[in-house]
Amino acid sequence: MRILLVSEDLPGEQIGGLGKHVVTLGNALLARGHEVRILGRNDRGNRHDNRQGNHSGGNTRGVGTRDGSTGGAGHGSAGAAQAARAAHDAARQIGFHGTFVPGFDYAHPGWKESQLGVFNPLKRPYFARKIGTAINRHAADADVVHYHGHLPMVGLHVAPGMNYVQTRHDQGSECLTHLRFRDDTPCTTLAPRDCSACICAHAGPLRKSVTAVAVRRYREQTARAFAMHKTVFVSHFLQRQFLRAVPHADLARCRVIPNFVDYPRLAATVDGALAPVAGRVVLVGRVDAGKGFGEFLAAAAGRLPELAQVLVAGDGPQRPLLEGRHAGPGVRFLGWQDYPGALALAASAHVCVVPSVCEEACSTTVLEALALGRPCIALARGGTPELAAYQQYPGQLQLAWSMPDLVARVRRQLATPPARRARAAAFGTDAAHILPRLLELYAE
C-alpha cells in the first residue's frame, strides 16, 4: 500500500509526542513492506542549514521549489541536489527510514493574534487550506493519506474521493489552544465567547465577539470534516470531549484507536539496561505549563525519602525558572534527551512519574513506562485512566487524584525495592496489535 503521512510538526530537531508517533508509524509500515512518505514543512531548517533546502516544495516523486513546482530554469541541478540533500537530512534528523517531502510552509508573521487580543477567524482555515493544497499536490499516487496535525478541518480541502484519514491526538478538535487548559487547570467552558480569555485576559465585547466567530467557525468546519472523512481519536476521552462541545456532530465515520509504541525497541532497551536504580524518580517531557513539573517539584519538596533522586529529562519554557527554584542534590535537570537516551533513563527508574495537570489524550510517556515494565504514577485525568488496560502487572499504573496524593504514592513506591520484572512477550499497544486496525481502516 502507498501511504502518505502528513504533519506540520515535522521536521524538527526536538519533536514532541505527536511527531514521534508519526515517525514510529511510518517506520512500522515500512518494515511491513508498505511504501511510505512523510509530507511536512519546508520552512523548518535542519541542523545543517536553516535557510536552504527545506524551503522546497515538490511534485509527487521529487523535491522542487517552494511554490510546489519542480525545479526548472533558474534553479538548476545544483539547487535540486541541495533540496534533495535537505530532504534526506530531514528524514535522518527525525529518524524516519523513508522519504521526507518538504511540501508546505506554516509560518506567517502577520496574524498578530496576541497583539490584537482575538482569535482570528481566518487564520486556521488559511493554514488548513494550505496543507490541503499540498496534500493534493503530492498524493496523486497514494492509496491513502493519513494526517496527524492540529487543524482538523484540513479534510475539507483535499480532492473529492481521496482516501483520507486523520488522527486526533489532542483536544484541538474544538479548542483553539489544543489543550483546554486555562489558569493552571483544565478548562470546562463551552461558550465560544469565553474562549477569548485564552488570548486576552480582559477582553471586551468586541474581542469576545470576534473570538466567538472564530471558535464557532472552527468547530463547524471540524464537524463537517469528521462527517466527510475517516477520523481516529486516540482515546474515548477525546471523542467524549468533542461531543460535549458539538453534541450533534456526525461521528459515524470515527473510531477510537490508541497510540502505539515500538515494543521490540522498548524490549531491547529493557534487555540492555542495568538494574533499576533505587530512589531514581524519572520525569520525561516538555517542561511547560500543563505538564505539571513545577507542581510536582513544589509538592515533593521535603516530602520524599533521603535516597530519592529526581531526574527531569526535557526542555521547555519553564525549565530555567524551575531549575533555578528546585535544582539541587536531590533534583537534577538533564535537558533535552534524544529518544534512545530518554528510554534508557526511564528503564533505569525506580518509578516513572507523569505529573501532567492538563488532560492528556493518550500519553505516550505513560505507555512507554508501562512497556518498559516500570511502575508509573500519574494524575487520573483525561485519557490516562484508559491506559490502565495496558499494565503488565497489577498496580503498575497508579492513578492519583491530586498532586499531594501523587507525591504520597511516589514516597510509598520508593519504600519498596525497585523490582526488575521480566518483560512480557507482547504489549497491548505494540504496533503489531494496532497496525492491523489502522490498515483495515485504510482499506475501507
Image: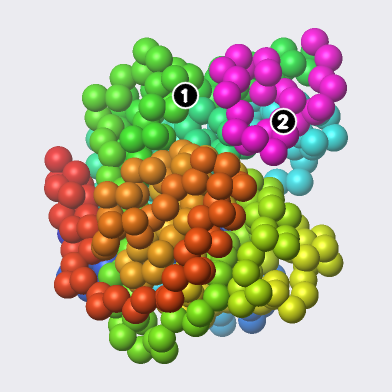
Q: Position of residue 207 (x, y in %)?
A: 78, 18
Q: Residue at the spot x=51%, y=55% of the render?
A: 409
Q: Does the magenta stretch include residue 293?
A: no
Q: Position of residue 304 (x, y in %)?
A: 64, 65
Judging by the rendered image, the residue that carries numbered circle 2 is 198
Q: Reply above or below: 98 against 203.
A: below
Drawn side of residue 247 relative to residue 191, left or right: left
Label 2 to label 1: alpha-carbon separation:
21 Å
Q: In which quarter of the image is the N terminus?
A: bottom left
Q: Residue at the spot x=85%, y=35% of the render?
A: 115
Tag 2 and tag 1, C-beta contact below 8 Å: no
Q: What amino acid is at disc 2? A: Cys
Drawn side of residue 426 relative to residue 3, left or right: left
Regarding residue 126, the answer to whether it shows in the image is no
User: What's drawn in magenta, residue-wise?
Assistant: 181-205
Mark 2 or mark 1: name the one nearer the start of the chain: 2
Type of colouring: rainbow
Regarding residue 418, the answer to whether it shows in the image is yes
Judging by the rendered image, the residue that carries numbered circle 1 is 221
Q: Is mark 1 on a helix, strand or loop?
A: helix
